[in-house]
Amino acid sequence: MLSPLRPDADYCVYCHAPAAGPCATCQALVCADCCELTGGEVKKVAVCHSCFRQGAGRVGWAQWSGVLGTVAIVVAIALALLVLVALL
Ligand SMILES: [Zn+2]
Ligand SMILES: [Zn+2]
């Protein structure tokens, strides 16, 4: 090992192997074997298996659907206002 062993080294909460990093959703420390790399092409995020099963792996899609939903609502309101103005 090049780096000295740390007594407070972070270990995977699932298999107690040295952790690779925290889960993006629940912040639990996980090793490379106990997480799924997911996310978009640019930004990869590691999500632990239990969060991944609950759909957290589709963070990017959830964010996009949220944005698209907001845009759709704004467009709907704008159209409704246009119709009101046209009727008056
Ligand atoms: Zn692990
Ligand atoms: Zn998690």
Image (cartoon, grey):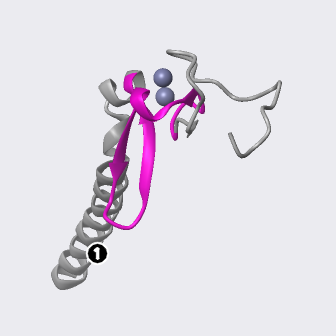
Q: Residues within 10 Å of mark 1 (few under 14, many from 20)?
A: few
Q: Residue furthest top?
A: 15
Number of residue marks? 1
Q: Residue furthest front?
A: 1
Q: Which residues are magenta?
A: 24-49
Q: Residue at point 37% right, 47% down?
A: 59
**As rendered, which of 24 and 29 lies closer to the eye?**
29
| Residue 58 pos. (x, y %) | 31, 44
Q: Quadrant of the N terminus?
A: top right
Q: Is residue 36 magenta?
A: yes
**As rendered, which of 8 and 42 lies closer to the eye?**
8
Q: Quadrant of the C terminus?
A: bottom left
| Residue 57 pos. (x, y %) | 34, 40
Left or right of 79 on screen, residue 26: right
Q: Amino acid at mark 1?
A: Ala
In what element is the residue under mark 1?
A: helix
Q: Residue at point 17% right, 84% down?
A: 86
**Disc 1 C-beta below 8 A from ligand 2:** no
| Residue 15 pos. (x, y %) | 50, 15
Left or right of 84 on screen, residue 62: right
Using the rendered view, name the quadrant where residue 63 is placed.
Answer: bottom left
Q: Is residue 14 above or below residue 19?
A: above
Q: Residue at point 16% right, 79% down?
A: 87
Q: Is residue 64 magenta?
A: no
Using the rendered view, name the quadrant where residue 40 is placed.
Answer: bottom left
**As rendered, which of 4 and 12 lies closer to the eye?**
4
Q: Which residue is mark 1?
A: 78
| Residue 34 pos. (x, y %) | 42, 26
Left or right of 13 on screen, residue 8: right
